[in-house]
Amino acid sequence: MLPRVFDRFFRANVQIEGSGLGLSIVQAIVNRYGGEASLRNRTDGVSGIVASIGFPSAP
């Protein structure tokens, strides 16, 4: 599912309330300012994901 998490209206769990727009909004903001957003599965044996957002430094 990770490749789709930034898609508008995508919801990994339809039983949890929400519109599926949150991460697509984050992606739009990050793109607007030349940054990068990513999600990846944890690799330490614990369930969950790691989210990161980065923006270029100001001159």
Image: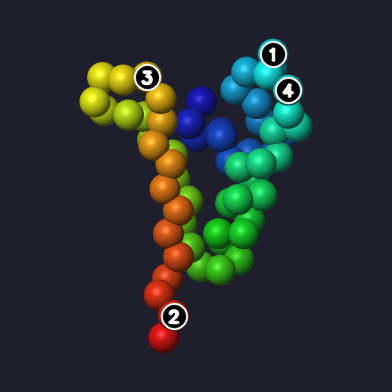
Identify whether 49 is placed above or below 21: above
Position in image of residue 16 (x %, y %): 68, 19
Q: Of label 1 and label 3, which has the lower sequence position?
A: 1
Position in image of residue 39 (x %, y %): 44, 39
Distance between mark 1 and mark 2 Cα atoms = 41 Å
Distance between mark 2 and mark 3 Cα atoms = 35 Å
Q: Of label 2 and label 4, which has the lower sequence position?
A: 4
Identify whether 20 is placed above or below 56: above
At label 1, the amino acid type is Gln
At x 64%, y 45%, the residue is 24
To which quarter of the image does residue 50 belong? top left
Q: Name the residue under label 4.
A: 17
User: Label 4 neighbourhood size at 10 Å, few (<14), some (14-19), many (20+)?
Assistant: few
User: Label 3 neighbourhood size at 10 Å, few (<14), some (14-19), many (20+)?
Assistant: few
To which quarter of the image does residue 41 belong? top left
Distance between mark 2 and mark 4 Cα atoms = 37 Å
Q: Name the residue under label 1.
A: 15
Q: Is residue 47 left or right of residue 23?
A: left
At x 51%, y 68%, the residue is 34
Q: Name the residue under label 3.
A: 47
Q: Mark 2 points at which residue?
A: 58
